[in-house]
Image: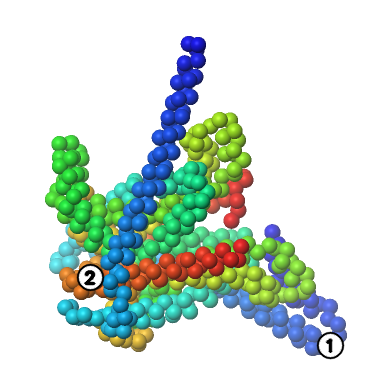
């Protein structure tokens, strides 16, 4: 790997013709060169500093709450601004449950779309569907939220929700998970909207990952008489495994921290309930709904602690995702881009 | 012939499995695209009626009255422009460091990973961070705090695309310029930046598209403002926040404006994405 030598200017000035003018020009070049390098380096360090500052500021802000409640803060679900008592178990569990459900729905469908685009789709449609999915990945989350609130939730409340409640009523475990009354909004609706939102992301990352599989490998398998099913299962997926897992974790990171799509439809109830149709809350929804209304310092600090938790959880997930995606780049035959 | 039966059976079973597999993949594509099409058509259907001249000329109304979204549109524009002005130079310079100077040094690898994490970090956390950093120290919500929050989202996007684009430039170009005696600054300014110009601009467009719809980082930095205000030191309205506020309200007229605003934001974001795509396609 060739890195441009920063001594290029000084090397040029080592053998000047004879005029001092050239020397001065060389010195000026050297100085601007060094200044430019420091500017780029400082900017790069700023990214690092930004990250560390976020970590430190959030930790500092959450100190009062951690000091007052200790570890109890993470394992209780009291959320009482009147008595100034807080615990974020309900938010944490809401965040994890909605994201988990969203992944459960979006990962298989997203993989299906990626498989369709790389192995099955006729070339004419491939580009347009691919572009459509990439564009949809850019639609702001508030759009999903407003759609969920005004269109999906009322329709769901009238049609599918009562039907599901009746359907699962005689089944032991499912009857508690899908217990009424049908509110329309709630944990399940939030998960579904999250799933729709991360679907284009999973589909487009998986498609990119599938496209790194060397065509030779696939053609060899097809040449042996393998069906599409066998090629995908035994060649494409094993090769692209770490990329697919990395992409899914990236989507999980998005889902965990997603605010607006969830805030609209989750119902903001600080309580862990057994039914998925019941209203709940997530860390980000609680912060979005209550931060500007938080009156006591302890209230603000509790919300900041919740934010710190969210940052910490997503940091771990996203760091793991990066490591998985980077591993893919080092595979033999993969494209390095 | 009896020994042919198992092979025949296996063949049929494999074919059958394949049919199921392929149909499942097709079904999931149709299913996924249907939801997304449903969302976009309802958005178009509900928002198109509100896209009138009033939307761009009148202020946000009090409950029960009619009006437009002028102050929110202008507020969004001001904060987006500021965020891009703050974030783009930093992003381009940092991306240049990673691609030209840092490359495989340990610090560059760490910065690259942290930058990618910031790229998908929860935007509400960015809002909290700027609240702690600016709003608390200044003592009040302000447009400039909102712009800083958006700038933090711009930087990682620009860093990533700038680095990617610069790395596509072949090293032979750099070496040719260096061999002529050009110092690194000139090589980068006159050779690599020139060659990667379209890609870098694409990155900036994508960053603008990303922050146009961001709501969470503005919630407690720029807050909101029912009135016309261009002061950077005062709370400022923005489209996403107004959409949020109006959609959560019980008033019919506010709902109508929220839909119109949502359509406006989506069209902007999609338009910017398409523009970025055309720009980068022309390059390659």
Could you tell me which residue is drawn at 42 percent across and 42 percent down? B25
Could you tell me which residue is drawn at 71 percent across and 84 percent down? A28
Q: Position of residue B6 (x, y in %)?
A: 47, 17
Tell which subunit mark 2 falls on.
B
Vertically, is A8 above or below A223?
Answer: below
Vertically, is A319 above or below B175?
Answer: above
Could you tell me which residue is drawn at 78 percent across and 70 percent down? B179
Tell which subunit mark 1 falls on.
A
Element on which disc 1 rests: loop
Give the position of the C terminus of chain A as an image quadrant.
bottom right
Q: Which mark is residue A222?
A: none
Residue bearing mark 1: A19
Dot 1 crowding, Cα within 10 Å, few <14, some 14–19, many 20+: few
Viewer-nearest residue: B146 or B11? B11
Q: Position of residue A219 (x, y in %)?
A: 59, 38
Could you tell me which residue is drawn at 38 percent across and 45 percent down? B28
In the displayed structure, does residue B280 sit left or right of residue A275?
right
Badge count: 2
Dot 2 crowding, Cα within 10 Å, few <14, some 14–19, many 20+: many
Viewer-nearest residue: A311 or A123? A123
Furthest residue to the right?
A18
In the displayed structure, does residue A87 sit left or right of residue A234?
left
């Amino acid at each position: 790997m060739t890195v441009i030598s920063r001594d290029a200017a000084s090397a040029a000035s080592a053998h000047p013709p004879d005029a001092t003018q050239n020397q001065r020009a060389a010195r000026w070049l050297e100085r601007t060169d060094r200044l430019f390098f420091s500017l780029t380096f400082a900017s790069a360090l700023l990214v690092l500093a930004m990250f560390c500052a976020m970590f430190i500021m959030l930790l500092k802000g959450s100190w009062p709450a951690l000091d007052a409640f200790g570890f109890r803060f993470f394992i209780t679900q009291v959320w009482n601004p009147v008595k100034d008592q807080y615990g974020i178990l309900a938010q944490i569990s809401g965040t994890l449950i909605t994201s988990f459900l969203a992944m459960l729905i979006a990962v298989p469908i997203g993989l299906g779309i990626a498989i369709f685009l790389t192995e099955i789709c006729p070339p004419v449609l491939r580009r347009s569907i691919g572009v459509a999915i990439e564009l949809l990945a850019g639609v702001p989350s508030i759009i999903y939220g407003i759609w969920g609130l005004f269109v999906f939730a009322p329709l769901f409340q009238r049609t599918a929700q009562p039907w599901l409640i009746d359907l699962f009523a005689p089944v032991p475990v499912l009857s508690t998970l899908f217990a009424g009354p049908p509110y329309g909004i709630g944990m399940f609706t939030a998960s579904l909207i999250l799933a729709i939102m991360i679907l284009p992301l999973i589909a487009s990352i998986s498609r990119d990952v599938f496209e790194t599989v060397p065509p030779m490998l696939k053609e060899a398998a097809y040449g042996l008489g393998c069906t599409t099913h066998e090629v995908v299962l035994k060649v494409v997926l094993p090769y692209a495994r770490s990329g697919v897992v990395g992409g899914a974790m990236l989507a999980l990171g998005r889902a965990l921290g997603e605010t607006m799509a969830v805030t609209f439809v989750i119902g903001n109830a600080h309580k862990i309930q057994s039914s998925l149709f019941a209203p709940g809350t997530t860390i980000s929804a609680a912060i979005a709904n209550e931060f500007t209304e938080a009156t006591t310092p302890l209230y603000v600090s509790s919300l900041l602690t919740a934010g710190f938790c969210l940052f910490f959880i997503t940091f771990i997930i996203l760091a793991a995702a990066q490591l998985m995606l980077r591993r893919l780049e080092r595979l033999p035959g993969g494209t390095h881009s | 012939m009896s020994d042919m039966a198992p092979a025949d059976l296996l063949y049929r079973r494999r074919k059958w499995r394949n049919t199921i597999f392929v149909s499942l993949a097709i079904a999931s594509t149709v299913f996924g695209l249907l939801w997304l099409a449903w969302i976009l058509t309802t958005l178009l259907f509900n928002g198109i009626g509100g896209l009138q001249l009033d939307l761009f000329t009148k202020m946000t109304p009090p409950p029960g009255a009619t009006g437009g979204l002028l102050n929110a549109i202008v507020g969004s524009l001001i904060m987006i422009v500021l965020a891009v002005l703050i974030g783009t130079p930093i992003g381009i310079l940092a991306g240049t460091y990673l691609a030209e100077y840092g490359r495989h040094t340990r610090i560059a690898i760490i910065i690259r990973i942290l930058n990618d994490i910031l790229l998908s970090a929860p935007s509400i956390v960015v809002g909290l961070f700027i609240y702690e950093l600016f709003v608390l120290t200044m003592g009040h919500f302000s447009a400039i705090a909102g712009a800083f929050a958006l700038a933090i989202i711009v930087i990682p996007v620009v860093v990533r695309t700038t680095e990617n684009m610069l790395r596509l430039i072949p090293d032979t170009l750099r070496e040719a310029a260096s061999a002529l005696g050009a110092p690194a600054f000139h090589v980068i300014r006159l050779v690599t930046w020139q060659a990667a110009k379209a890609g870098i601009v694409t990155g900036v467009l994508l960053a603008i598209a990303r922050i146009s719809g961001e709501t969470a980082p503005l919630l407690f930095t720029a807050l909101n403002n029912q009135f016309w205000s261009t002061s950077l030191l005062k709370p400022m309205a923005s489209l996403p926040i107004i959409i949020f506020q109006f959609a959560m309200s019980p008033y019919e007229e506010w709902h109508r404006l929220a839909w119109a605003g949502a359509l406006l934001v989506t069209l902007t974001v999609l338009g910017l994405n398409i523009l970025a795509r055309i720009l980068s396609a022309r390059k390659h």
